Amino acid sequence: MANEPHTTARKFLVTGASDGIGAAITKRLLNQGHRVLAIGRDFSQWAEAEGLEKYIVDLAALDRLPEHLAQITVQHPDLNGAILNAGSGRFGNIEEFSYQQISDLVAINLLQHLYVARALVPLLKRSAAGDLVIIGSESALSGGRKGAVYSACKFALRGFAQSLRAECSNSGVRVCLINPGMVDTGFYDDLNFKPGEMAENALRAEDIANTVMLVLHAHPGTVFDEINLNPLKKVIQFKD
């Protein structure tokens, strides 16, 4: 993709950046001349790129996460914003989950977001500017069958975003929650369902990246509190 027009270069942290939605957001930011601190688990297929700094971190390992985040904040006190994207899906009736599986799902879909925000928000507040964009889910809007644990995390994340929005506004920090519906990414590789085959059955990762750019490029006094995106025709296809 050719370099796109951009405003003043900024520095962003992106979680879950190695593939899917996070990769699309990271590449879009780099194409616009921004610097990106990319947190992910596997960057082996990534080429080196100007402005890209990669951090291999298991965000679900909460006991070590504060140490990783402290290192990043010390090295990058000039951070301008963050896109909190990382997450994972597991679905089933509540009795089909072990207690450890519930704990793991809450760690990656809720708690690590709180940890990352806890580390970064003080930096953004001190700078009196910045953006915190959280990638949520349509599951934050309506609970469904076999989605109790996942929806619980996403509902909580939505409340967290709303509270942060109120907490940060006086410091000039904008907080936005983006709730996508089904997106055509590797999210469904290990699940027993996926979006339908037609183009209108799923969003593209680039659609979410476009939305993030809309938020970041808005007038500094404008906040998109919450944005919901869905495919035109929602179709769920179950695998054999």
Image (cartoon, grey):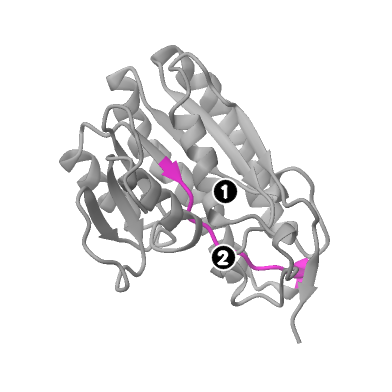
Query: In this figure, which residue is indicated by the disc labeled 1?
Result: 207
Task: Give whichever of 142, 102 is nearer the camera.
Answer: 142
The percent position of residue 160, horizontal first and vertical second, equals 57, 35
The quadrant of the picture occupied by the C terminus is: bottom right
Q: Residue at x 29, y 46 (%)?
A: 36
Magenta-span inclusion, residue 195? no
* 157, 15: nearer the viewer: 15
Above-or-below relation of 4 to 1? above
Look at the numbered disc 2 and give the secondary structure of its residue: loop
Q: Main secondary structure of the magenta part?
A: loop
Magenta residues, start to end: 83-95
Q: Pinpoint residue 81: horizontal percent, then vertical percent.
A: 36, 34
Q: Residue at x 70, y 52 (%)?
A: 151
Residue 48 found in image quarter: bottom left
Frontmost of labels 1 and 2 is 1
Q: Picture coordinates of residue 175 (x, y %)? A: 50, 28
| Above or below 47: residue 86 | above
Q: Which residue is mark 2?
A: 185
Reply yes or no: does residue 94 show up in magenta: yes
Name the kind of residue labelled 2 in the image: Thr
Q: Nearer the viewer, residue 229 or 132?
A: 229
Q: Percent from the top left, x then y, of residue 44?
A: 29, 73
Give left or right: position of 54 versus 61. Answer: left
Mark 1 → mark 2, Cα distance in angstroms? 12 Å
- Asked if residue 152 can be seen in this view, the reply is yes
Label total for image: 2
User: Which quadrant of the view contains residue 102?
Assistant: bottom right
Which residue occupies 33% across, 50% down?
Answer: 2
- Give the residue at the far right of this rendering: 145
Judge whether residue 16 can be spotted in this image.
Answer: no
Amino acid carrying mark 1 in the image = Asp
Q: Along the horizontal axis of the image, is 78 left or right of 132?
A: left
